[in-house]
Image (cartoon, coloured by chain):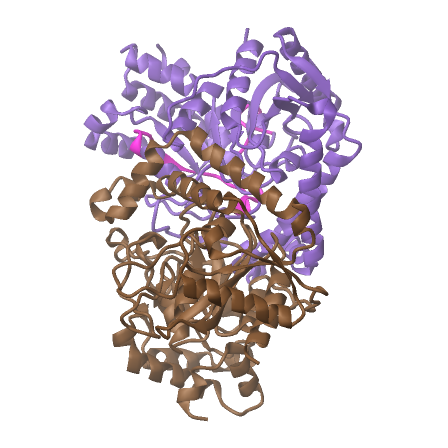
Chain colours: A purple, B brown
Amino acid sequence: MSSRVLNKLGLCETLALISQREVTALEVINAYFDQIEAREAAVGAWQERLTREQYLQQYHEQENFYRASLLQGLPLAIKDTIDTQQFVTEMGSAIHKGRQPADNASCIEALVAAGAKVLGKTVTTEFAYFKPGKTANPVNLQHTPGGSSSGSAAAVADGMVSMALGSQTAASVIRPAAYCGVVGYVGSKDEYSLRGIQPLAQSLDSLGVFGRKVEDIELLRSILLQQAKPAADLPQPLKVLVCKGSEVGDCDVQMEQALTQFAEQLQQGGAELITLDACDLIRQLVMAHETIMAWEVCRNLYFEAQHVEQVSEPLHELFIRGQQMQRSEYLAAHDKVAKINHWLWSHPKHQGVDVILAPAAPSAAPAGLNTTGKPHMSRPWQVMGLPVVTVPHTAADSGLPLGIQLIGRSRADDQLLAIANWAQTLLNR
Amino acid sequence: MSSRVLNKLGLCETLALISQREVTALEVINAYFDQIEAREAAVGAWQERLTREQYLQQYHEQENFYRASLLQGLPLAIKDTIDTQQFVTEMGSAIHKGRQPADNASCIEALVAAGAKVLGKTVTTEFAYFKPGKTANPVNLQHTPGGSSSGSAAAVADGMVSMALGSQTAASVIRPAAYCGVVGYVGSKDEYSLRGIQPLAQSLDSLGVFGRKVEDIELLRSILLQQAKPAADLPQPLKVLVCKGSEVGDCDVQMEQALTQFAEQLQQGGAELITLDACDLIRQLVMAHETIMAWEVCRNLYFEAQHVEQVSEPLHELFIRGQQMQRSEYLAAHDKVAKINHWLWSHPKHQGVDVILAPAAPSAAPAGLNTTGKPHMSRPWQVMGLPVVTVPHTAADSGLPLGIQLIGRSRADDQLLAIANWAQTLLNR
């Protein structure tokens, strides 16, 4: 099997081939490094990383462990907002140049104990907010990869690794996954340990995982939670609430068409479709998210807010907004979220809904590397703390992927992933 | 004013005296150090700290800043689960001997920017769980100070500082505050940035603050949140839901009597009392808290759970319980909490309740330093994410304080503190 193919497989597919002795882990690792060496200058996914020689030397030092392990020593990419002992963690900011954490984040410890090997740190926007890093979209280098987990999404999309960690406060996992055409997942609020993941806004922060297939996410989740992958009993019939992009905010025609097409494919697969008529309520969630985020970010980034000469203009503006905000506005936003969340799941039309379907972004990845695109399509679900998966669907006229997101009930992450896995299989038929 | 008195004043009282030029900050700082030098060998509140000479030298290097600042360079004690740049943060565990964080926690940055000066790190139980440190109760050195924020509570109680930070996952602020006879406060879930506070269980962790008076807590809260202290409009009449200790679990007679007495004093002050009849529901919250904590702790402390030869037996047992737990049990605990929380605030008898009154611990501080006492009195409120203040009330026959806790509605921290301030004034008449 040529290395061109090997590095584009999903994690589970790769592990199956290794287990069947069709390939060795070393062949796969070398295929990833071939890709990195060929493409990194153009893609710019990495903030800091091991060279092939370093990786292989460290692999050989623990070869017996890796060969007996679940993840076989395959490389893992870590967003540079997640603390690592082996690499500095600078959060995309000059303020933290050379910042050396004392520990690995708990999510890294869990994956490393299962045989993953951290290849390096991937590019993040400044403090996981708006200011882009150097990363380009591997599908079209003239377009943004999205943010803030830009490097993690691009590294998986380009076949430099098959698993990566990120974090999401607004749209930082789902949008780059959609723009780059990979699977992205954020867990329910409080689902995973965030120890060692630098916080941005405590009501909103979630761990994110990138892979090529939904089954890869399921495997990584089972390792992170130390639980066996549950049996996937799909609801019969599956009830899908379709949320048009226009219910959330600006959304282009191609994305709306992709959503309709995706929904129809699920319907042909046996799902029952219900159309969400939100009468502006979902748009209100977008604003509530913005309010909560502004309040919390300037308090989480207290130190950085005292050093605004070293932060970007958009982040500085967010600090000012959060500092000038009245507490009553912040509390009102939380109240609004609680009420709309209740409305959403208790509305008679929505009884028994298993999953919500919505655009993962307002369009395919925009041209240019000076912004990472708009986050509004993720804000409503993030502010309600719901689990979300995006799966690559179809290509826009530009050839760039159009991602659709599936949103689950709170803490129903297992059911959501089972549904997303079924949907991905259906789309790939 | 003699240093004996100075070091026992509340923070706000001290700041007022400094502002009125009755005393200087240096006199107060020296009074704290007199106390530390006289008592630390017996109390054992500190894990690591500045000497008087180091403190004064650093104070003088920034004297202009401190003299112009709100907190005047007065000393702040930090529980050793909260990251500091100036001191190692070892979490009461040999595993993290010499662990050097890269940053100060955001809560420290906020207080330091307002003119607090970190005097040192205070003793915590191992990973804020059960295994005691060296600290004794300043009121009676043969008794436990409670845990896990043992050193922070003892340092404030003994007059070594007038402000300290801690954290609470089960009872780690309220219980030591009650045992040592100081004011302890934990914020509503997600109320404060926890950046740099080492997580134990993500659904449960809260920032905690220790002081001598409720007004001191209000001042520190206003700094942490960068908001002016709100006007304290007390509800008229104040509706108080009284939760007997026996509704929660084991509770001794003196504590039940203290609760009744406290409630009657509030009633004489004009409050309306309602008795909680929970029919076992509050006890079910205790069990739900234990379940959620076990699941989350072993995943947060993933690294430590791989090194059980270096952890205490109770923590090891908690790891095993969490690892063996089915996810369904964890989810059922969360569901139960949501249902009982809804019952509590929507029950017709409880309409308009402003605050819940309950024992802060099942008794006064038990004798002996080999345990930190039982945490069940805090678990129900912590698992619902409610804000809590404990105020010292009366003395048991042993002479040790009996603390009562006031529990507020979610996110109604300002109202809760206003009520607690009123209650404290009433008790001290």
The foreground one among B54 and B92 is: B92
Q: Quadrant of residue A276?
A: top right
How many marks the image carries: the answer is: 0
In this rendering, the answer to whether B142 lies above or below B192 is: below
Name the chief secondary structure element in magenta: loop
Point 38% across, 76% down: residue = B158
* In magenta segment, residue B137: no
Magenta span covers which residues?
A: A113-142
* Front in this rendered view, residue A228 or A363: A228
Could you say which quadrant of the image residue B330 lies in? Answer: top left
In percent of width and height, residue A179 lies at 59, 27
Q: Give coordinates of residue A224: x percent, y percent.
A: 39, 32
The image position of residue A354, as x and y in percent, is 61, 21
Q: In the displayed structure, does residue A134 sit left or right of residue A231?
A: right
Residue A291 in sight: no
Q: Where is B372 relative to B247, above or below? A: below
Magenta stretch: includes residue A130 = yes
Q: Quadrant of residue B317?
A: top left
| Residue under the image location 32 percent in, 25 percent down | A71
Against A58, residue B357 (above or below) is below
Give the residue drawn at x 33%, y 79%. Answer: B36
